[in-house]
Image (tube, helix red, strand yellow):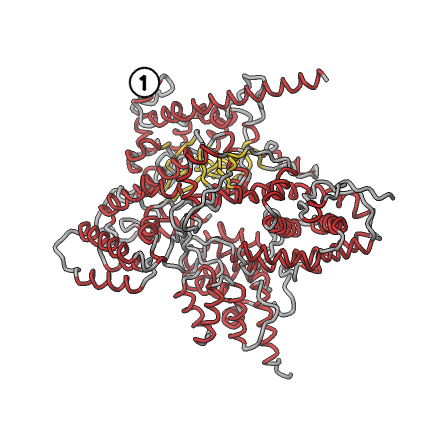
Amino acid sequence: MTKEEIGNRGDDMMIETTNPKPKIENPDEFNVHYLQLYYGKLFPYIEFHKWLSYGHDGKHPGCDESYFNRREFSFTLQNDVYTRYRSFKNASAMENDIKEKCPYKIDIGAVYSVDPSKRKAYSESGSNVFVPVERELVFDIDITDYDDVRYCCSGADVCSNCWPLMTVAIKVIDTSLREDFGFKHILWVFSGRRGVHCWVCDAKARRLTNEQRSAVAEYFRVYKGNENNARKVALMGFSLHPFLARSYVDYLKDFFEGELQATQSIFSSKEKYEKILDMISDEGIQSELREKWENSARSSLSEEAISRTRWEQLKNTLQSKKQKAPALRMCVEEIVFTFTYPRIDLEVSKQMNHLLKAPFCVHPKTGRVCVPIDPNNCDEFDPLAVPTLSQLIEEINSGGDRMEEDDDDLDRTLLGKSIKFFRSSFLEPLLKSCKEEIESSYKAKIEKSKDSLSW
Amino acid sequence: MEVIRSQKRTVSNDVVSNPTIPLYLTAPFMEVRLEEFELFAIDRLRVLKGVSDGLARGKNPKEMDDLVDSLWKEHMRHSDVSEMLNKDIISHFVLRLVYCRSDELKKWFLSMETALFRHRFRIKSFQVQRATVGDFGLSYKPVTGAQVESLKEKLGQVIRSTGEKSPNVETVYYKVPFEEVPDLVAGRRVFIQKGYAFVAGSQLVSMVITQFRSHLSKALILTNRKWMTTIREREKDRLTPIVEALSTSYLGPDYSQSNEYADISLKDIDQVSKSSFPLCMRHLFEKLREDHHLKHGGRMQLGLFLKGVGLKLDDALAFWRAEFTKKVGAEKFDKEYAYSIRHNYGKEGKRTDYTPYACQKIISSAPGVGDHHGCPYRHFSEDNLRAALGRMGLSSRGMEDVMDKVRNKHYQLACTLTFEAVYGTSCDAGINHPNQYFEESQKILKSKTPSAPV
């Protein structure tokens, strides 16, 4: 719900269009007939089903064939009717239902203890058997949450100047999930309009309790500010935690001083730099810098150059005063973190039964497909180049939709690259480790039953 | 019935002077006299209530250690060590019965018992701590020597990041799956590598707490089941009345139902918000009037408070609709927001009647971008707080007193002082619930202006 609200706030703000730039929003891209064709010909049902079965495909005696069937799906239909607790026996049941209902949005929920569509019958039996038992660890990052630090767009708008904020977020979180938490099967997905979703699919991640999910989410939380406090990030202590230190050194600092300065010129005007001066908890330094900058306002330099100079001045001033004021110890880092550190919507991550939009959905406002993003090459991802529904339909009409044939054919279609990436970089390694896990737990079970027999 | 002690101990001198803390894993078989059943439970409740107050005051861990130590000595001490252990165990199991009976009660008991255990554990010696870990059957291999050495820099970084200036990397670390120490992970108080957290010897308490909490949580569910199916009926003339009376005596009043002072209607709401709302609610109320919108956290905090002060469901819907439609339009309001308001009043979903948030919950919330909920004394910057207090009419002297409490993280005391400054009377009970603030204020205002004679 909160997401929709923010979206609306953004929509209200779309007034001036003096400087036409590529817009993510595109109402001509989406309609129900296109969507029917998309679900009819392009949606990757097989991959989708394989993913969410996690190796429980009935081929191994240790498989749990009810696994996929216990997963909750929810559809948002054309007339905004929202239906929760749908479930499917198998891939073709899912395919048929999606084709028939043609949902504007598909959400994926948790795997429950019993088939979610039959939860009523179970609840009548009295005991509390309908509970979520597994769920990917998910993260949701929205560009709207960066509105106070980006000057090119606001609300749901995204452009190539502010998208790199998302790219940095992917790098920071992805690295930590792998290096710190030891996860391997991580899927990043473009949310279709203004952000990214992350699905951590390792068995261990899927079985985390709510408390453990919250712990991981809190580990990532740095941003504690709210509307009533200018200092949004407070870094305490005498050094950064190793995770924050690595993020700072490897990604945030360079991004702040390079790309962010180039695209946002965050010190170039009084309005902009006052926000940063507010973060310095020393009035002497604030007024010293303010004076310097007010006097240098009439300069022939470019906005970017002014911004860079001011940042250097701020750093030098803080450096020289550091000894005297311990509260300023982390001030430079705090400013960098405020502008660049990922702002995750943590509530989404904390609860097992929270729904999240499925990959390969089409965003109704932009017409763009929620395609996977390769974290190793996320710098190259351009949200404005993501295929739209109408482009895909055009391709089908010109005969370019034969995508199931083989991988080479896939490369030639708009959506093919994404499906190929999903298959080879995410799905195959995932299924391999799922099979290994099923095999080893099956063996252990056999061993155990042998033991008990011999007694 | 025979007295059978399941936890029979050989009372060596060591145990007498420094006993481990019982883990309450199984209910003891022993004979308990009826008056002890109740008296022991009341003594333990006094301790738990003291813990709850300490936490609400925002005491730091060290202060909590001291508090728990003195509470325990005051209420639970006995000259005979085995008697003391008995009292500890009996009182715990009696309170399980008392507090297993609803989710709200369970939650309170679970967090207070866990806090109690945490601080009792922390003040024990390292030997006793290790012995307690052993009692739990946790067998973590310590990491020492070369491996600690190779991670020394990172481990030192973690210690410095928590505010220690010169890091003393400890000699013993335990390598445990990160899932087993969620509180250390959440606070970034451990180094994590490839799924394993390196827990320092001095952080043993976290591992034990996780076990303690999950064990107790499961046990409460089982106790609840037994209570519902057999005990309540079987003991209806003997234990049941005692059990039912015990829980209400110490949880403080329940603000989910409005009472005589709390019955406001739509036309008074603006006036009442100025005269009787605590700062957290005043702020939300003003922001809503200003922005015609509040994000989820704010809607919950304010919405449930308003329910507690007696705003009826129909009035609540009208109130929120009037504001939100200015921003999002009536259709969107009815579709997306009306549900959650009815939900708060128990008319949708699980149909639970949700209770208004107490200070402790509000203080511990974490408002993010665009949020206005939370506790102003904790979440506002100093400048914003001063401005807000100024608007409530505090003198500069009163303001300094409040700010002093804020600096020492006594947020509820800060709110209490604000109350006292605004109404010019003392508030001995202290503020621990926004609805309590409201009611106390209404009491004062109504006593000052007696209703006009007819």
Establish if A62 lies above or below B281.
above
SS assignment at label 1: helix
Q: Residue reaching furthest bottom?
A: B453
Residue B409 appears left or right of B77:
left
Please state which of residues A155 and B11 is positioned toward the viewer in this rendering: B11
Can you say which quadrant of the picture contains the C terminus of chain A? Answer: top right
Residue B226 appears left or right of B362:
right
Establish if A424 lies above or below B422.
above
Type of amino acid under label 1: Asp
Establish if B217 lies above or below B403.
above
Chain under numbered label 1: A
- Residue B96, image x, y percentages: 71, 48
Q: Residue reaching furthest front?
A: B13
Q: Quadrant of residue B221?
A: top right
Dot 1 surroundings within 10 Å: few (below 14), some, or many (20 or more)?
few
- Residue B442, image x, y percentages: 59, 72
Number of disc labels? 1
Residue B408 in view of the camera: yes
Residue A214 appears left or right of B353:
left
- Residue A253, image x, y percentages: 29, 44
Residue B268 in view of the camera: no
Q: Residue reaching furthest right?
A: B1
Residue at left offset 52%, top offset 53%: B338
Residue B263 appears left or right of B85:
left
Please state which of residues A16 and B133 is positioned toward the viewer in this rendering: B133
- Residue A82, image x, y percentages: 50, 41
Q: Which residue is mark 1?
A: A408
Q: Quadrant of residue A129?
A: top right
Please state which of residues A132 and A108 is positioned toward the viewer in this rendering: A132
